[in-house]
Image (tube, rainbow, N blue to C red):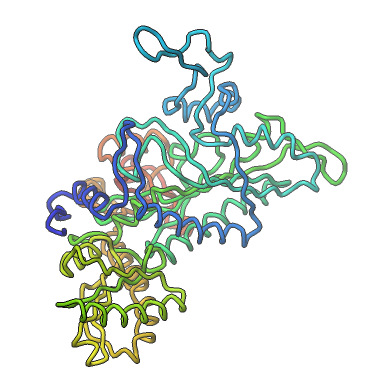
Amino acid sequence: MSKKITKRSENFSKWYNDIIIHADLAENSAVRGCMVIKPYGFAIWEEMKSILDRMFKDTGHVNAYFPLFIPKSFLSKEADHVDGFAKECAVVTHYRLKNSDKGIIVDPDAKLEEELIVRPTSETIIWDTYRKWIKSYRDLPLLVNQWANVVRWEMRTRLFLRTAEFLWQEGHTAHSSQNEALEEAKTILFIYKKFIEDTLAMPVLCGLKSQREKFAGAVDTFCVEALMQDGKALQAGTSHFLGQNFAKAFDVKFANKDGNLEYVWASSWGVSTRLIGGLVMSHSDDFGLVLPPKLAPFQIVLIPIYHNQQEYKNVTNELKKLANNLRLKNYRVKEDYRDTHKPGWKFSEYEVKGVPIRLVMGPRDIENQTVELFRRDTMKKNNVPLDNLNNTIDTLIVDIQENLFNKASKFNSENTFNSDDFEDFKSKILQGGFVFAHWDGSSETEDEIKKLTKATIRCIPLEDIHEPGSCILTGKPSAQRVVFAKSY
């Protein structure tokens, strides 16, 4: 199976698509720009959801669900918001079909009085709802998250990275003070950082988006940025401080402790199935997908080697005992006893799918009381005594997770640069990676740098290192370096 995968060095984009397809993660659908997430890919998303959902709930958040459809008039209430999303909106204009001589057509008599927008994000419908829920300071803070799908009508699509419809979570919170809402946005940012680094084994930078790059309708947008193996950045998650913009647009006020009415303060935040694309591009190799154990749908696969039915029976009986024992330790285990595929084919299949550990047993292993163990991240194998297998697995699961993070961190370090000269800057951007450089703070300069290099400001680092300098393009004063990169 690995022969079907294009090498990263030859064509990174095709390599990425090959892995998505051959690892059975997703495929293009009959609807242009939309994808079918296959069971194996969805199982990875379910693991992400499970872990992240618990992290939200542990910090006091609760889940709810809001409508898919948003009245068009709602979007127009917040000017920056509608400007940001107008070109990506899918619009429902009619509510009925009918038969005709030309087949099924839209019934012209079933036109909606007001068009409905298929949600690109839910701030507007949620803040219209919050107006009914929030009356007093006693109703605050309101910490709500929803797991949902959204539609943004993308012209150029790539599986997981940019599709017309995708899955995500979106949190929307209301607070009695500016500081509390701002702290909420930062709290979530560091939840994302911890989740992505600890679970996905992807190191990230935390920072603030420039005014040009911030979320439409936000006062400030915080982000986590990851570096992919081709040297491009991936925005892995965002958290927005919305100020009172949406509260004022939808007239959401609360009575404070003195009985006076105030507009509430807000945040919103989200990560999506784009993280699966980031996972693929961070860790995978020319043999296929590489998964960190914390996310693998199955962490261990067991495969028998045999030459006849008696050997098959003996070996599978032993493997079933191992599998049951591993499940008692809460490992996710796959047993592959299919006699329709040879062992070598199975080895290749699970290498392409990135299963962290493979255990193989044959008649000789039973005699020797050993099992062959293969770890996907290093492609190395060795024989392990059965009486030491549990300890070996326990250690190895942790080691693989740490190894993937350390490998990605090393790549980041080797591909992060400082630059103080525009010619040098252009050269480093062309090479790929994060480039820390001075910027004069103007959107005009930001636009010109993007025009000349295709690089954007990925973030203004939160670790504000006061290192005065001169903008690489204009020479004007700059208080600190910002992070530039080409991006997805």
Decide which of 382, 341 is in the foreground and name it.
341
| Residue at image point 74% right, 35% down | 132
Which percent across, then down, holds residue 178?
67, 46
- In the image, residue 128 sits, relative to residue 476, either above or below, namely above
| Residue at image point 16% right, 67% down | 342
Which percent across, then down, holds residue 339?
21, 67
Decide which of 383, 480 is in the foreground and name it.
383
The quadrant in which residue 250 appears is: top right
- Confirm whether residue 481 shows in the render: no
* Quadrant holding the N terminus: bottom left
Q: How many marks?
A: 0
Residue 74 as seen in the image, left or right of residue 348: right
Which percent across, then down, holds residue 425?
25, 49
Decide which of 13, 416 is in the foreground and name it.
13
Decide which of 56, 219 is in the foreground and name it.
56
The quadrant in which residue 44 appears is: bottom left
- In the image, residue 287 sits, relative to residue 447, either above or below, namely below
Q: Residue furthest front?
A: 310
- In the image, residue 287 sits, relative to residue 109, either above or below, namely below
| Residue at image point 45% right, 50% down | 237
| Residue at image point 27% right, 91% down | 369
* Quadrant holding the C terminus: top left
- Confirm whether residue 66 shows in the render: yes
Which percent across, then down, holds residue 258?
87, 44
